[in-house]
Image (cartoon, grey):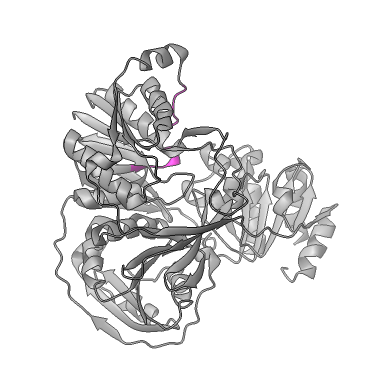
Amino acid sequence: MDKILVGLKRVVDYNVRVRVKSDGSGVETDGVKMSINPFDEIALEEALRIKESGGANEVIVVSIGTSEAQQQLRTGLAMGADRAILINTDDAPDVLSCARALLEIVNRESPDLVIVGKQAIDDDNAQTGQMLAALWGRPQATCASNIELDGDKAIVTREIDIGIEKIEVDLPAVVTADLRLNEPRYVKLPDIMKAKKKPLDVIAFSELGVDSGPQISHSSYEPPEERAKGVMVDNVQDLVTALKDRGLL
Amino acid sequence: MSRILVIAEHDGSTLNASIAKTVACAAQIENAEIDILVLADAAAPVAAEAASLASVSRVLTIENEANAHALAALLAPQIVAAAQNYTHVFGPSTTFGKDLMPRVAALLGVNQISDIMSVAGSHEFKRPIYAGNVVVTLRAPADIIVVATVRTASYKAVDTGNSAPIESITVNADLPTHTRFVEAQAGSSDRPDLQTATSVVAGGRALGSVENFDLIYALADKLSAGVGASRAAVDAGYVANELQVGQTGKIIAPDLYIAVGISGAIQHVTGIKDAGTIVAINKDEEAPIFEIADIGLAGDLFTIVPELTEAL
């Protein structure tokens, strides 16, 4: 195939324990470490492996966000992507608007395969890939743990609740990456230097003519209810007694 | 009045347990009429089960050979055609619902709400974000169809005993041929299903090997419990993917959850927060799992678990 398009979202790093702003208007992100959404990193790794095994000519990474998302795109370029596109906006567009914006890029680039993470670890929506596939009128294969390319088709193994499922999709298609699709590579210093010279186009979100409605509004943010602190027991006998006291045995 | 269409998840013969919980969420919306839509090759057994759920007004069936397997690309256009007179379309937050509902929403030209954990009004809902570290309240405009998935661990199944009418319907929808089912392999287990079991025993990386995971199975067998695992244990290959509990695995709410050798990363904890009683067994007294456990026992799992299994 010719091109693979990979979506990279800039998110609060996996290891950061986020806090709600004191006025409940959002989540504190000032001074917090930001990274590529881990599932998107897996998506990129898969695209790179396909390219490195001769299955594709070019890997393009695309992000939607503020100019700071260029950092994550540069990391994607350092991992091995050929070029990057930032759809630049200071707003936080909803998922449908993002899918519509990605469709515009898809229409310009005509990729044979789009790979994105199965969910972003900030809003945990798990929607972008499916929405893009719907708007594009193309197949979707979510929660992929294996992709086997076969000419103009792909057989995708999906992690589903009962076990695994294999589906066959015609290309182009959208695949969303699950945890066990691969283990992403570490970026090496020389690659970071090289990545600085790779092309990174910035397109204004507003230039894409995306209809950004109808919106769902976020009215308040709050911490979850905490579970009450429990008790420690000293041995198995006390554990069994405690379980019996609660009527669980 | 709200008219809510719930999309049935099933395996061709049995209605998935998540649907009775999805209906329970829909029933939280005041003045709601709830219909269930069964898309199947042959819908009768699943439709009969759906019709027995309390709060359900009607069961609609769309029978088509193409619906023999739940492929989102084929189901979505049929659901869109059937959803036109509804104010809400709900599915469960299972891999079935998560795959399908965003595709339905995009075809309807609306955003989708994931993982409803509480209903604040017909168009206002709460849902968890950041692995359950934050709860956000969302409000959808009153003039759009609300498409959503329901976090089933937040709801108790509605009762059965109803006998709602079942109607076969036909819809005009072009079904694509670009997506084809090949095969499914269910995890081989005669144990209770992880998502519906009243008790669950779960193991983490500290188990150390596939063989040592037998300790977990032995304890689970004594309790007639389902078996779960942390992401670390699944990544290490001790158990299959479908046993993973947490942000990116299953969200469960058993009466009893016993976490063995699981440190309690926030990504795991979000999957068990709604459990009735959480028991933690871990050698590290400082492990975060003890922060949320109702009963903690610090010590060597390789001694404690066999002793506990013996004592039951």
At horizontal 25% and vertical 32% (from top left) the residue drawn is A4
At horizontal 77% and vertical 45% (from top left) the residue drawn is B303
Q: Is residue B24 visible?
A: yes
Residue B96 found in image quarter: bottom left
x, y percent for residue B300: 77, 42
Disc tally is: 0
Residue B84 found in image quarter: bottom left
At horizontal 39% and vertical 31% (from top left) the residue drawn is A67
The relative height of residue B90 versus residue A119 in the rendered view (above or below) is below
x, y percent for residue B162: 43, 87
The relative height of residue B46 versus residue A148 in the rendered view (above or below) is below
Quadrant into which the C terminus of chain B falls = bottom right
x, y percent for residue B130: 53, 48
Give the residues in magenta.
Answer: A176-186
Quadrant into which the N terminus of chain B falls = bottom left
Which of B268/B261 is in front?
Answer: B268
x, y percent for residue B289: 69, 48
Q: Is residue A200 left or right of residue B15?
A: left
Q: Is residue A76 left or right of residue B133?
A: left
Q: Is residue B91 left or right of residue A13?
A: left
Asked if residue A181 lies in the magenta stretch, the reply is yes
The relative height of residue B209 versus residue B103 in the rendered view (above or below) is above
At horizontal 30% and vertical 72% (from top left) the residue drawn is B38
The relative height of residue B149 versus residue A67 in the rendered view (above or below) is below
Residue B144 found in image quarter: bottom left
Q: Is residue B10 visible?
A: no
Asked if residue B6 lies in the magenta stretch, the reply is no
